[in-house]
Amino acid sequence: MNLQGRTFLKLLDYSAEEIEYLIDLAIKFKAEKKQGISHKICEGKNIALIFEKTSTRTRCAFEVAAADLGMHPVYLDPKSSQIGKKESIKDTARVLGSMFDGIEYRGFGQEIVEELAEFSGVPVWNGLTNEFHPTQILADFMTIKEIYGSLKNKKLVYMGDARYNMGNSLMVGCAKTGMHFTACAPKKYFPNAALIKECEKIAEKTGATLKFSEQPTDAVRGADIIYTDVWVSMGEPDSVWAERIKDLTPYRVSAEIMRAAGENCKFMHCLPSFHDLKTEIGREIFDKFGIDCMEVSDEVFESENSVVFAQAENRMHTIKAVMAATLAGDKL
Ligand code: CP
Ligand code: NVA
């Protein structure tokens, strides 16, 4: 397997073997890091990290992974570069491509990261768009592999807004790797029909199944993983809160839902999460709507079955694997 020179824009572009290869590489890097074994295989390279939306995990993962691989990262924040306002993506791509060996992009439409990749001439990595969050899925699947030993045939139920980056990417990832995916939400929150169709075609070959349900307790029965995400994503207007709270409260991951799934079921979340009143937005929502948690109860979030911080740690190891494979694939 040699992924040298490839971009990493969405899981649809990668085969199951390539996805598993990146996860296994991340597991190897994690073990080496824990043993203090250095792996500076990208020494001397420079990478640009473009963030048009805020981030804790993804930014830190790219910066730490870059340092561990011997690279120099340059962070471009949501406000202080010319991107989009004074300079087009196509021009930015050609400028950055001439200075950097790789570019990470977090922002809005998937077409932006695709355009960056087309015109920069260097590997581009998707750090989250409205449509997809592929590096998150690698970390999630690495965590599932660490817990269960393999991905195939595991049942993952996604509760909440499944039309956005996390629901879409998990559905693609499950289809590719032969997992059983269920989106559980009111119908209007199911992924779009074209993407479902594409995933169904993939699933025919891998043995994956895709289901769509509006009934939480039925949907989660026998689940190995229940996954959720925030009800309102970055870049969406505050005006959608009332509708989301009304529509998605029955789909909150509560202790009752976890019990319906079975005692071994793990709880996953990409984070950040609104599970208590210790955030500004959490308190604002409490003042306005009187709810003290949103997509997951604090009890489930803090329970032994919750593996959210393992997922967060694995962001760094998997992002390292993506950068190492695409920038130094011939050294691996
Ligand atoms: N999960 C995730 O992407 O987190 P950040 O927004 O903090 O990067
Ligand atoms: N759906 C969330 C994911 C955050 C990691 C968002 O786009 O804000």
Image (tube, rainbow, N blue to C red):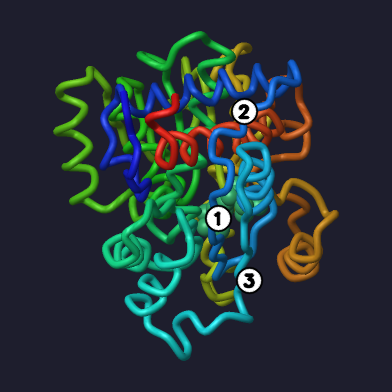
Quadrant into which the C terminus falls: top left
Q: Secondary structure at mark 2?
A: loop
Q: Residue at x 76, y 61 (%)?
A: 290
The reply to whether residue 304 is visible in this rendering is yes
Work out how far the residue at label 1 is from the one at label 2, CA to CA, in angstroms: 16 Å
- Dot 1 or dot 2: first in sequence order is 2
Q: Which mark is residue 46?
A: 1
Q: Does residue 166 lie above or below 243 as drawn?
A: above
- Mark 2 = which residue? 39
Q: Does residue 200 lie above or below 237 as drawn?
A: above
Q: Residue at x 37, y 28 (%)?
A: 19
Amino acid bearing label 1: Asn
Looking at the rendered image, the disc whose residue lies closer to the viewer, 2 or 3, is 2
Work out how far the residue at label 1 is from the one at label 3, CA to CA, in angstroms: 17 Å
Residue 150 shown left or right of residue 14 in the figure: right
- Mark 3 = which residue? 77
